[in-house]
Image: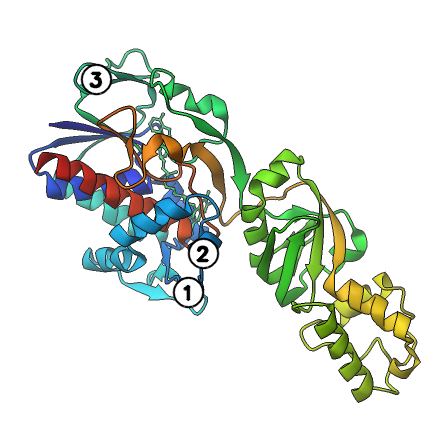
């Protein structure tokens, strides 16, 4: 039995180890386009590798996986975050779960994950080829033949093929599937990015953090909660990254031009915010409005918001009219900024889109029209928010494919 795995990333490497342990007789060969395997994993989590998440803060799976929720529900039932942790700990990698529920190696070194996977591949007898970029997959009578971009390398034939090429950023990169009929592609677009906002009154607050806001895209239902960070180019932080994930397709379609609405107090509604302002007014009647503000905001941010609400900073709280309070309340709960492009988020970046899940059996991850052809990882139209969810998706899917393939031969 000859099995080819395309891509030596998170999904491909774990899949090869699990497969070889289940099918020791099988010949498993992994082809990697780059000079080195697992290059992306080596830079994950800012070099610390946030390899999974406890999921304790996740109510509904759709919050963690805006695309591929149903697939992930099954995949996590098969190989959960606990399985990921148990597996890596079993291979000698001690892990720690942070307060924010993100899981890292105790060593805080992504290279420990890389070394562990590569060592186990070697020990199990997986054959790894680097600088072998696959150019084409062609179905034959029995199995598939794969050919390489480098024409000096002869095409090879395999009984089964597992595709784990990661997130391909453009539709052209899917050309290697051209001979596989019935595989449709959801146009890839970026996810997990920050927002460029060209408003110097906002960006002058660079470094300002608010622990809990609600950020939404105006006139849509897309919203996310979390901390927010003002940067020199606009806005970042978990609330923005989450929103960029939920709104990835919408923002791409709108050329990254949209109105962002921020509820700085994270209140349910305006009424709740108005009540907070009334309480503040009662407690601070003779004090200057610029100096007494909701505890979750900083003085600088508060003054910025007062200016936006056209409130004179010299006024005292008891001088604010009902109209002033209503205006201030509106600014605090629906403060609108123009998004004018996407920024970078160096810690993480993923592709939304990829192989359409309708083309695969989501329980086995086998292509519906191509028996023996499997998919796992970011290549599929599955992606998560930041916090270890994307690697968890890769590990879970790798395990599903390994088990589906092994079942075929038992
Ligand atoms: C900077 C950064 C930081 C990140 N940090 C985190 C994090 O901390 N936690 C988290 O959960 N997620 C993180 N992610 C996302 C996570 O790394 C990916 O979702 C995950 O690696 C996907 O795994 P994969 O196996 O599907 O693809 P990859 O790990 O990307 O592997 C795919 C492999 O396939 C190879 N390949 C592609 N095409 C071909 C071809 N034609 N022939 C042969 N080989 C090919 C590629 O070279 C690559 O090595 C981060 C991403 C980035 C960019």
Q: Is the residue indicated by label 2 positioned so its CB lies within 8 Å of ligand 1?
A: yes
Kindly identify which residue carries mark 1: 101
Whole-angstrom CA distance, mark 2 to mark 3, is 38 Å
Whole-angstrom CA distance, mark 1 to mark 3, is 44 Å
Label 3 crowd (10 A; few <14 / some 14-19 / many >=20): few
Question: Relative to the observer, which residue lies in front, 330 or 296?
Answer: 330
The residue sitting at 71% across, 43% down in the picture is: 258
Total marks in image: 3
What is the quadrant of the N terminus in the image? top left
Kindly identify which residue carries mark 3: 156
Residue 201 appears left or right of 250: right
Q: Quadrant of residue 6?
A: top left
Mark 2 or mark 3: which comes first in sequence? Answer: 3
Secondary structure type for disc 1: loop
Using the image, determine if residue 152 lies above or below residue 71: above
Kindly identify which residue carries mark 2: 387
Mark 2 or mark 1: which comes first in sequence? Answer: 1
What is the quadrant of the C terminus in the image? top left
Secondary structure type for disc 3: strand
The residue sitting at 62% across, 51% down in the picture is: 221
Label 1 crowd (10 A; few <14 / some 14-19 / many >=20): some
Contact (Cβ within 8 Å) of mark 2 with mark 1? yes
């Amino acid at each position: 039995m000859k099995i080819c795995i395309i891509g030596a990333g998170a999904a491909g490497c774990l899949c090869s180890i699990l497969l070889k342990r289940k099918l020791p007789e099988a010949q498993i060969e992994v082809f990697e386009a780059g000079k080195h395997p697992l290059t992306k994993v080596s830079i994950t989590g800012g070099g610390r590798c946030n390899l999974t998440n406890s999921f304790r803060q996740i109510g509904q799976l759709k919050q963690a996986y805006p695309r591929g929720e149903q697939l992930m529900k099954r995949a996590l039932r098969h190989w959960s975050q606990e399985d990921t942790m148990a597996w890596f700990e079993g291979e000698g990698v001690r892990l720690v779960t942070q307060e924010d529920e993100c899981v890292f190696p105790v060593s805080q070194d992504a290279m420990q994950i890389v070394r562990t996977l590569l060592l186990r591949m070697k020990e199990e007898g997986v054959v790894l080829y680097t600088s072998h970029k696959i150019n084409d997959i062609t179905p034959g009578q029995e199995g598939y033949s794969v050919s390489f971009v480098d024409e000096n390398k002869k095409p090879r034939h395999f009984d089964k093929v597992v595709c784990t090429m990661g997130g391909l950023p453009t539709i052209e990169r899917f050309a290697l599937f051209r001979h596989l009929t019935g595989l449709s592609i959801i146009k890839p677009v970026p996810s997990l990015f920050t927002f460029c906002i060209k408003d110097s009154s906002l960006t002058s607050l660079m470094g300002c953090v608010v622990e809990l806001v609600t950020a939404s895209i105006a006139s849509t239902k897309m919203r996310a909660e979390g901390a927010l960070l003002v940067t020199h180019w606009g806005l970042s932080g978990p609330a923005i990254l989450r929103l960029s994930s939920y709104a990835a397709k919408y923002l791409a379609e709108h050329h990254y031009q949209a109105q962002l609405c921020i509820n700085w107090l994270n209140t349910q509604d305006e009424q709740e915010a108005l009540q907070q302002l009334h309480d503040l007014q009662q407690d601070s009647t003779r004090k200057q409005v610029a100096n007494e503000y909701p505890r979750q905001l900083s003085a600088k941010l508060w003054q910025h918001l007062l200016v936006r609400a056209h409130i004179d900073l010299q006024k005292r709280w008891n001088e604010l009219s009902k109209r002033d309070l209503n205006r201030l309340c509106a600014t605090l709960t629906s403060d609108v900024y123009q998004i004018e492009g996407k920024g970078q988020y160096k810690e993480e970046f993923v592709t939304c889109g990829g192989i359409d899940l309708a083309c695969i059996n989501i329980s086995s991850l086998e292509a519906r029209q191509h028996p023996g052809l499997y998919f796992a990882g970011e290549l599929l139209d599955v992606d998560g928010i930041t916090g270890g969810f994307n690697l968890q998706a890769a590990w879970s899917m790798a395990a599903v494919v390994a088990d589906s393939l092994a079942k075929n031969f038992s």
